Amino acid sequence: MKKESAATIRAKNYTKDCNWFCYFRTSGVNGLGYEDGVHRRDPSSVIKVDDLYYTWYTKSVGEHAGFGTGDPEAKVFPWDLSEVWYATSPDGVNWEEQGLAVGRGPRGSYDDRSVFTPEILHHEDKFYLVYQVIQHPYLLRQEENIAMAIADSPRGPWRKLDKPILRPSGNGEWYGDDDNRLTVKSKGDFDSLKVHDPALFFYKGQFWLYYKGEPKGEEMNFGGRPTKWGVAISDNPEGPYIKSEYNPVSNSGHETLLWHYRGGMAGLLSTDGPEKNTIQYAHDGINFEIEAVINHPPEAAGPYRTDNPDVSPLEGIRWGLCHVVASKWNYIQKFEVDETMKHLYMNKVSPEQWQRIQKEKNS
Ligand code: AAL
């Protein structure tokens, strides 16, 4: 008798819709590429204002030494002792660095140690920068928060809010007093220690802040770090942001990468977890389903926020910027969705035949 394996049963739940599938191409950009002694990384989404593209990113200088040097002032990571800078471009390839957007606050303030990993929302003539902040000292057990600055122009000046807009849940309990983030009596929520990688959207009449959470007591998860995404929602851009009861809304994924599509939210999950390297879609922004498994997604990508993301599932990430960390000094490059090989996966029909079939199916 014919029987079904566990894999066959599971496979029935996966989509057969190849419209979400793609490859990615990357290429160099001018102005934000490799530079000795300087890190540029974690670019925001790209937005277009008056025919010019804008991006914001983490910028820091100098060598880093990791944790445990005994010197509380020593730079720990490329994103430590950083600032948020911005650049403009007429074509997405030739970028001109414009300067500082948001710097660190004075010693004792919530952002005195580092400001980094920015994301941008342009909404009703205002510009909202959201980004990560660390308060000195940068220890393994130090919590990390998300903050916001607001401007009337993409060139600033930026007005920082007087406190972070999102904090870790803070629950869970450490074991012992050593600065060791693996030893816990209890872990607490998925975001008990750190909230990272903010991505802000105006969605269904509210402000939706997606983010990555990290817990106290990190343990590997399916061969990756236990990072997951949550969302916090507010009626006002400045908050208060209320974390969704459904959090975490992903079980995988590192840097957040989301885009609007036909009334729902699409996301690309990379780097960590059982569902890394998948594109997912949530018709309600909360309940994500896997739509495609992909190879080599761009790292820490910030897509171009087109005015017209509903044209096709991948329209919202057709191109953008991402970073390269596999080199001594981190730098920024361009990514593009590559659909040239798609027809191979569409039941061996030509792109023309495929389009005809889709048209017939939808008529
Ligand atoms: C990135 C992001 C956040 C982390 C660090 C810098 O990949 O997830 O920004 O804090 O690494």
Image (cartoon, rainbow, N blue to C red):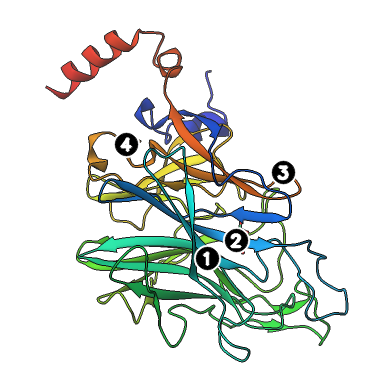
Residue sitting at 46 percent across and 77 percent down? 166
Residue under numbered circle 4 = 313
Q: Which tag is nearer the camera, tag 1 or tag 4?
A: 1
Residue identifier under label 2: 59
Residue 143 in the image, given as x and y percentages of width and height: 62, 79
Q: Name the element at disc 3.
A: loop
* Callout 1 secondary element: strand
Q: Position of residue 317 (x, y in %)?
A: 39, 40
Earlier along the polypeptide chain: callout 2 or callout 1?
Answer: 2
Q: Residue at x 71, y 57 (%)?
A: 220
Q: CA distance from mark 2 to mark 1?
A: 6 Å
Q: CA distance from mark 4 to mark 2?
A: 32 Å
Q: Residues within 10 Å of mark 1 (few under 14, many from 20)?
A: many
> Can you tell which of label 2 and label 3 is closer to the viewer?
2
In the rendered image, the vertical position of residue 114 relative to residue 5, given as above or below = below
Discs 2, 3 touching: Cβ within 8 Å:
no
Residue type (three-letter) at the residue carrying disc 2: Lys
Q: Earlier in the sequence, mark 1 or mark 3?
A: 1
> Mark 2 or mark 4, which is nearer the start of the sequence?
2
Report the residue marked by disc 3.
326
The correct choice, above or below, for 274 with respect to 340 in the image is below
Residue type indicated by callout 3? Ala
Residue 277 lies in what quarter of the image? top right
Q: Which residue is mark 1?
A: 84
View quadrant of ligand 1: bottom right
